[in-house]
Amino acid sequence: MTHSEMVRVRFAPSPTGYLHIGNARTALFNWLFARKHKGSFILRIEDTDIARSRKTYTQQLRSDLRWLKLNWDEGPDIGGGFGPYKQSSRLNIYRRAAESLLRKGKAYRCYCSEEELEARRKEALRQGRPPRYDNRCRNLTSRQIADFESRGIKACLRFKVPDRTIIFNDLVKGEVSFDLGLVGDFVIMKSDMQPAFNFAVTVDDWLMKITHVIRGEDHISNTPRHLLLFDGLGVKAPAFAHMPMTLASGGTRLSKRAGAMSIAEYRHLGYLPEALINYLVLLGWSPKNDREIFSRDELIKEFDLSGITKANAVFDEKKLRWFSGQYIRKVDLDRLTNLAIGYLKREDFIKGAISEEKYEWIKKITAAVRDHLSCVSEIADYADIFFKDRIEIADNERGIIEGQQGQEVLKAAVEVLEELDELTSSNVSRFVKTLQDKTGVKGKSLYLPIRITITGKAHGPELNLVLPILGKKTCLERIKRAIKIAY
């Protein structure tokens, strides 16, 4: 890449499903590379699969990318100097490019039917030969062509593949070679004059002046075709960088069945976008030090293609949850509170408008439970204790409050609480110390009976945060009820 050549990369998804972890990582690596080199990040929608493409997928995809803050410089919704940016709007461009190859003698018409092709594939496999097209239409005579045309047989267009080895330097994998004798002449335009995937991609990358193609290594087998097409069109090919695959923990392809969800589902659960970004970048990229937590600006500064690993990355849901928890702990409390309110409303814990006083109360709850969250939706599991009138104590926890020591602690707690005007964050430690002095009980033996009585759970947010939020009245009611249950 010369200094005068501006970096131009693209993310080119097919709108046949929701944005998933693997595709989001591809978008991220391209975005980081563009921002690192002050280049352009282009969003291109490859929607020529008419049967499976859906407008709703395109809309969700753009929404998810914006949520991840992977903004694009050119695209179908904002335009640019190299549009249109949807393949379905570029059909005439592909047809003109195909006709150019036809005139140059780089392509030819093929009249073979799908049935004939399938029969030949099976026969080649039976004989132990590569199941490639046998190029039989490459040298048809004008009389043969006229005969096919007279019978109304529609032709596809195939590119003439030379019988040689093609070698290219991949920016991640190094030198890669392919024996073109295994490829066969491939289709560039189907018989209905729709472009084949490899042809449309190549024409788009050429005309959109893409300088670097950064994509998953599952596309590396397409690269020889792309290089041949660039050469046939008489234009310079971009540099290629093929990232390792992202696999499930068992080494299988990543899928919903293997534990990965769409980006939309992670959003729905309340994962923070910056946590997802931080985790995604480490799937197949290694920083120069052992750091794991990076800000977006730090990632732009540190990211380089030389850091992309050759080994496949393994998606680890537990690690993602850890990252998410780290970001939840340090995110601005007001932002977290506003996110939490949505989930609390979903559970009907909150209804209607929220006053300033109510907001501050919810903010305290959010602060109390945030250290226990891996995603914001989990707040309902920890915050329910603040919204329920009555706490249910599990049978396996009752022994702690029904034992003699547990009962002594609870009865003493009632006495100490009733002496307080109110239970606040400033006097909660005094309440605990007085209770300890009164009973002679310390540690878990003191805290567990109180925790289980107040929250119904043996584990959860710190009591010194929970008790002031619930207040004296609620705490007394729950402790007295637990004493009655024991009898």
Image: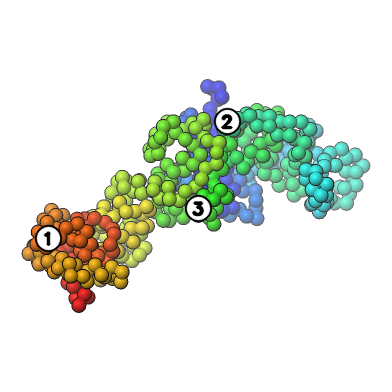
Looking at the picture, tell me which residue is in the foreground, 300 or 120: 120
Q: Residue at x 52, y 35 (%)?
A: 309
Residue 456 in picture, x, y percent from top left: 27, 66
- In the rendered image, is residue 74 in sight? no
Residue 358 in picture, x, y percent from top left: 23, 59
Q: Secondary structure at mark 1?
A: loop
For disc 3, the marked residue is: 260
Q: Residues within 10 Å of mark 2 (few under 14, many from 20)?
A: some
For disc 1, the marked residue is: 440
Looking at the picture, tell me which residue is in the foreground, 256 or 47: 256
Q: Residue at x 54, y 50 (%)?
A: 250
Numbered label attached to residue 171: 2
Mark 1 and mark 3: span between their CA atoms?
51 Å
Compared to residue 395, the image places residue 447 above or below, namely above
Mark 3 and mark 2: span between their CA atoms?
28 Å
- In the rendered image, is residue 51 in sight? yes
Of the two numbered discs 1 and 3 in the rendering, the one whose residue sits closer to the viewer:
1
Q: Quadrant of the C terminus?
A: bottom left
Q: Residue at x 18, y 70 (%)?
A: 404
Q: Residues within 10 Å of mark 1 (few under 14, many from 20)?
A: few
